[in-house]
């Protein structure tokens, strides 16, 4: 029933044989990447790693680093405490089937109601383990008692935990040309200054010095929309970044929920227990009381943007420096036995393939409610999320594939998709070889392609401008006479099952 801390989650992975402990010191600068990349590139996503002695400039950090904890279908299912991701998706589908929505707004309302049905609404509590150690940056440390020793972090050692600055956290420099250290699994809480609605998103955080960072909310993301309102009114924007706690928190932070739906509802729904939220020390935002580490602060709209990056990104290339807001730290609080969660992104496949893939599986029922002809959707690893989407449909009328192309490009973060291939329902969209076969054989390039323009992923280095570009869709379905196809469509070659079975029986195979 839900994980009380990231350490508890690590223990479950350990018991399930899904964890490798690395007891030798390993540098947070580039070395952890070597180990993590090898795991992530292993068949099925390898194992999660617990780096027990991560070093920063040669000094062992008191916080162990956990990485690749969600990087396989099995670990994703363990995090969801379910048999499989598909089982959770099926349950979510049933919850929403009661009254199919007719508009996107209705879908959002239905999602919110479905989450609340399961008592997923977050609850406020007064304090929690995330405040076991408190370091305020705006005033000298106000704590009276001496800083506690870290209990039993590694084999009973009692390394003193100094109230940390950003420089004491085992934040990774992932790739050689990265512009510095980056927090790679940060859950970022912001609030809409007009409606008060909360948002939880995952946006990487580049450390500039002990008290300032960049925060990489991209142009089209919800926190960037919140930020624009603070910039318009010139008021300080409170921001809280937390790490750890239940693995459903980082998962919910990455989920493409409609703007205005609180990701803590989704987290509560998935972990089958309300998220307990505690107020930050230095601003009014709330974070999970059971988080491992919390970094509180603000963005000042009067301060100029600062170049962020380069960073070895999801795309498999470095994203080059671009201007982003500066985040000022006002407090860091943490559990005494905090584990620092991390990931690396880079040339696929990586851990994010499973995080993004699980989102697609879970939200397939939502896609189906809007487009009932959709059978399945896949985002192949090679397409790094937004580059390639394959969708299978049960086609019953002319030009239906085009309806799906337009529909998907108009749906939330699907707007970023560069290439969409629509295939018939008898194609396994997760088998990229089968998809390529159907795509090549079933299309006439001129007739069956649709080129259009739209918003693009800002990470895409190939678009002519940041955040805008073109899109190409393919109708690789069987063509109908109503689509102007006057020839006969040939049958696909298939084995005669009776002959096959008879032969197997005769040869005893
Ligand atoms: C590991 C990881 C890192 C990510 N880093 C960023 C990032 O730096 N900036 C960003 O805008 N989105 C990033 N994303 C994607 C967002 O988390 C995702 O689009 C999320 O839905 C955004 O939330 P929002 O819709 O509430 O803005 C990342 C996703 C993952 C899995």
Image (tube, rainbow, N blue to C red):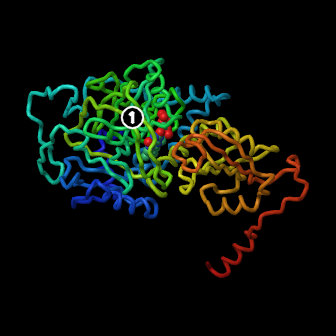
Residue at the far bottom in the pictured view: 507
Q: Residue at x 39, y 52 (%)?
A: 344
Quadrant where the C terminus lies? Answer: bottom right
Give me the residue at 51% from left, 35% from top: 219
In the picture, which quadrant includes the N terminus? top left
Relative side of 208 to 463, left or right: left
Residue ranking furthest to the front: 304
Q: Nearer the viewer, residue 89 or 144?
A: 144
- Percent position (x, y) of residue 380? 57, 55
Question: Residue 299 at what x, y percent from top left?
Answer: 37, 28
In the picture of the structure, the residue carrying the numbered disc 1 is: 188
Residue situated in front as seen by the camera: 13 or 344? 344
Residue 309's x, y, as percent?
41, 45
Determine which quarter of the picture holds residue 204.
Answer: top left
Q: Residue 367: x, y in percent? A: 62, 39
In this rendering, is residue 297 above or below 418? above
Is residue 119 visible to the viewer in this orientation of the structure? no
The image shows a total of numbered marks equal to: 1
Q: Residue at x 79, y 57 (%)?
A: 444
């Amino acid at each position: 029933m839900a994980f009380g801390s990231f350490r508890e989650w690590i223990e479950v992975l350990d018991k399930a044989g899904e964890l490798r402990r690395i007891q030798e010191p390993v540098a947070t600068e580039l070395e952890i990447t070597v180990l993590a990349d090898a795991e992530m590139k292993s068949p099925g996503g390898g194992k999660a790693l617990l780096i027990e002695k991560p070093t920063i400039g040669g000094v062992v950090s008191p916080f162990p680093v956990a990485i690749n904890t969600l990087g396989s279908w099995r670990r994703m299912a363990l995090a969801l405490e379910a048999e499989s991701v598909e089982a959770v998706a099926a349950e979510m589908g049933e919850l929403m089937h009661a009254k199919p929505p007719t508009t996107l707004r209705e879908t959002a309302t239905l999602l919110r109601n479905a989450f609340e049905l399961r008592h997923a609404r977050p609850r406020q509590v007064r304090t929690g383990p995330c405040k076991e150690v408190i370091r305020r940056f705006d005033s000298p440390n106000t704590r009276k008692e001496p800083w506690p020793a870290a209990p039993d972090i590694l084999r009973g050692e009692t390394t003193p935990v100094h109230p940390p600055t950003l420089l004491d956290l085992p934040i990774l420099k992932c790739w050689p040309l990265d512009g510095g250290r980056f927090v790679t699994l940060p859950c970022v809480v912001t609030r809409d200054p007009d409606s008060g609605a909360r948002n939880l998103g995952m946006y990487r955080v580049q450390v500039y010095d002990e008290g300032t960072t960049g925060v990489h909310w991209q142009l089209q993301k919800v926190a960037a929309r919140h930020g624009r309102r603070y910039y318009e009114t010139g008021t300080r924007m409170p921001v809280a970044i937390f790490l750890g706690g239940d693995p459903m928190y980082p998962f919910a932070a990455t989920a493409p929920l409609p703007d205005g739906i609180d990701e803590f509802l989704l987290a509560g729904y998935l972990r089958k227990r309300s998220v307990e939220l505690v107020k930050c020390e230095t601003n009014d935002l709330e974070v999970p009381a059971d988080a491992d580490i919390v970094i509180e602060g603000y963005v000042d709209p009067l301060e100029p943007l600062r170049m962020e990056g380069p960073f070895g990104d999801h795309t498999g290339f470095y994203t080059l420096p671009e201007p982003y807001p500066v985040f000022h730290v006002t407090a860091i609080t943490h559990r005494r036995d905090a584990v620092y969660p991390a990931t690396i992104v880079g040339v696929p496949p990586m851990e994010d393939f499973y995080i993004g893939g699980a989102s697609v599986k879970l939200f397939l029922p939502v896609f189906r409610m809007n487009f009932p002809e959709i059978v399945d959707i896949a985002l192949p690893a090679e397409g790094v999320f937004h580059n390639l989407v394959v969708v299978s449909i049960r086609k019953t009328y002319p030009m239906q594939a085009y309806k799906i192309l337009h529909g998907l490009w108009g749906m939330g973060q699907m707007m970023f998709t560069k290439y969409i291939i629509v295939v018939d329902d008898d194609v396994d969209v997760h088998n990229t070889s089968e998809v390529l076969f159907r795509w090549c054989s079933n299309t006439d390039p001129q007739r069956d392609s649709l080129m259009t323009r739209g918003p693009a992923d800002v990470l895409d280095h190939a678009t002519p401008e940041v955040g805008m570009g073109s899109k190409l869709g393919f109708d690789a379905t069987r063509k109908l006479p109503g689509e102007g196809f006057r020839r006969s469509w040939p049958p696909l070659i298939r084995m005669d099952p009776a002959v096959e079975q008879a032969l197997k029986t005769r040869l005893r195979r």
